[in-house]
Image: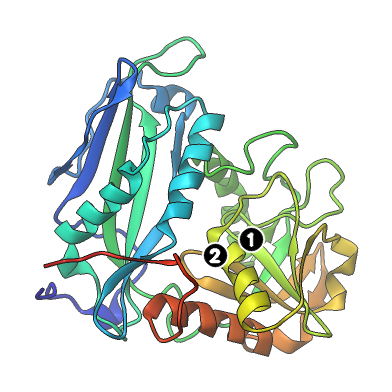
Amino acid sequence: MEKANLDWGSMDFSYKPTNARFVANWENGSWDAGALTEDANIVMNECAGVLQYAQTCFEGLKAYTTVDGRIVTFRPDLNAARLNDSCERLRIPTLPDGMFLEAVDQVVRANAEFVPPYGTGATLYLRPFIFGSGPVIGVKPAPSYQFRLFTTPVGPYFKGGAKPITIRISDYDRAAPHGTGHIKAGLNYAMSLYAIDDAHEQGFAENMYLDAATRTKVEETGGANFLFITKDGKVVTPKSDTILPSITRRSLMYVAKELLGLETEEREVFKDELGDFVECGLCGTAAVISPVGRVNDHGKEITFANGLDEMGPVTRKLYETLTGIQMGTVEAPEGWIHEIKCD
């Protein structure tokens, strides 16, 4: 497959349309089979459920070219399961078994020329999403829905390497107890926009959100889970019912324990113990791990000594191992890599 004539090395992390996307519709109690379309535009009623009551959820994953030239995706079965979990919470019809993975395969094959070559640092980002497309004026679920999956080639999240960032403890709440913080709902991200813009205006890269009930425990940022490293090399991640179960975070915790032999722990992490950790990272699909050097708590700076000027040694090992699995230079645990044949 001849690749598109793009400057892969200078590509940024932004939307660029590709050849085709997958579209399926739910009406009268069932999903249709779905099909590829070249049309990137959506036409719907002004009273569509997504426009009136934000009835929508989404996922994010990537397709990679491995060192031996294969095109693969990373644990897409977990994205499929998490999307259906989000649908159930938002009263959106779940996708039938196999539709998500079939959509991934079809869309990546149709856009294979946009899967960047190995070694460029670029990848093909996949965005699956479902929304209420039918009209609804009363507060209730929409009568019809659409599932779409599009792709866009993106550059590395960090140009010139991942430098430790400074974040702040936010005065805003990301998610309420028993709310929607544990699913990938569009409304969660809309609620974070004011806070992230405010953080940027104040000179911070991100927000650290605390639990809304007590404001004593670390939860996540607007779009990533936290990982912390203790002085004795233990990998710790916050445990909470109101944070998104990150696929990257779950994979990194497995890598830490099973492949690197590190001690791991998922538990409540209190704000008052942040100074006890020597490394900190934000983990998610886009960057895998973004190192954090400092947390600003209303003027008081908390620093992570081993990752203040560059990615800490444990964090780097986790990053290199997981990206190695994705790119085919490290043997993957069974079932983690989904190959897409593009003839």
The image quadrant where one finds the N terminus is bottom left
Q: Label 1's element?
A: strand
Residue 128 against residue 278 in the figure, above or below: above
Residue sitting at 30 percent across and 15 percent down?
28
Q: Position of residue 173 (x, y in %)?
A: 72, 44
According to the image, label 2 marks what residue?
Answer: 248
Along the viewing direction, whichever of 84 and 306 lies nearer the viewer:
84
The image quadrant where one finds the C terminus is bottom left
Q: How many marks?
A: 2
What amino acid does circle 1 point to?
Answer: Asn
Query: In the figure, residue 18 lies in which quadrant?
Result: bottom left
Residue 156 against residue 147 in the figure, above or below: below
Along the viewing direction, whichever of 299 and 297 lies nearer the viewer:
297
**Residue 159 relative to residue 89: left or right:** left
Q: Residues within 10 Å of mark 2 (few under 14, many from 20)?
A: many
Q: Position of residue 31 (x, y in %)?
A: 29, 28
Q: Are marks 1 and 2 in contact (CB under 8 Å)?
A: yes
According to the image, label 1 marks what residue?
Answer: 225
What amino acid does circle 2 point to?
Answer: Thr
